[in-house]
Image: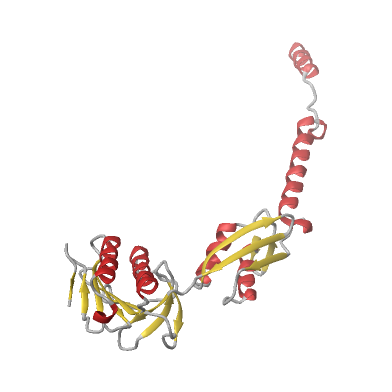
Amino acid sequence: MANRRKHIKKKIHFIKPKKSIFKRAVFWYAILLFIIILAVFYFLLFLPEIQIKNIEISGNEKVDKSSIEAVSENSINKKIINFYNFSIISKSIFLANLQNINNNILNKFPQIDSIEIKKEFPKTLILKVKERIPVAVFCQSGAIEKCFFIDKKGVIFEELPAVPQGMFVVQQTLNVKNVFVGENVIDKNVMEAILKIEKTLKNNFQINILSALISAPLKLDITTAENWRIYFDLNSNIALQAVKMDLLLKNEIFPDARKKLQYIDLRFDRAYYK
């Protein structure tokens, strides 16, 4: 028994005492790393010198500047902590998501076509606004006719009480449904074709157009201010049909003859008129 106690004492004698965690280098490295992370976190999120304070807006005419600024402000406020009625918000320029700001403004204001946004460190956002330019008026037929400005891309963006003088009307009998501002109601390529035809008639022959009607099966009817019509096939080459129209009006249908003209039909291999 005595020998056993002696053996145990020898073992206890050779066991090294545990080193305190506070004396270990790895503990202090971890603490230092944690402090550095906190400092970087604070710098990126809360340092006053990098909080966005200035929003510079240019290019807007119809859309109110303060309204654009309000949407931008709301988009840059980032809730870091949100618990019941307690929240911590950062306006750090590093957290500002330019694509998110862009989308929020475009969704809120259909009158705006595009925005160029850039950061100017340390605390400024610069917004260059490009508003939509009305090229015609789109009118939706129905129990109550609604009319809107439409741009060259076929997007409607402002409801109108009446058709402004000097602008032509675009209508369609395809996919008749309720439309909303900001909606692309006319295919971009069709809208470009209509504008090209309108420009050709006005510049080459001093003929204004009153309306453009898109109907099935993809037919385009142009009504001129001289009260005669032009029929186009939207399934065929519109550019080629426009060239045929131009040649016909230059070489065959002179201004005096247009007084009795009823229509020009360009939907076939040959152009017909009456």
When asked about the image quadrant of residue 228, the answer is bottom left
Name the spot of residue 128 as percent of width and height, x first.
61, 64
| In-image side of 43 versus 250 (left or right) | right
Above-or-below relation of 98 to 56: above
| In-image side of 146 versus 272 (left or right) | right
Residue found 79% across the figure and 30% down from its top: 25
Name the spot of residue 190 as percent of width and height, x first.
33, 66
How many numbered discs, if any?
0
- Viewer-closest of 162 and 97: 162
Residue found 59% across the figure and 75% down from its top: 61
Above-or-below relation of 171 to 218: below
When asked about the image quadrant of residue 86, the answer is bottom right
| In-image side of 137 versus 100 (left or right) | left
Q: Which colouring convention does the figure follow?
A: secondary structure
Name the spot of residue 77 as percent of width and height, x first.
65, 64
Residue found 29% across the figure and 79% down from its top: 255
- Viewer-closest of 190 and 161: 190
Residue at the far right: name it. 23
Figure quadrant of the C terminus = bottom left
Above-or-below relation of 268 to 33: below
| In-image side of 167 versus 17 (left or right) | left
Figure quadrant of the N terminus = top right
- Viewer-closest of 264 and 11: 264
Residue at the far top: name it. 3
Name the spot of residue 179 as percent of width and height, x first.
37, 76
Above-or-below relation of 142 to 221: below
Residue found 74% across the figure and 55% down from its top: 122
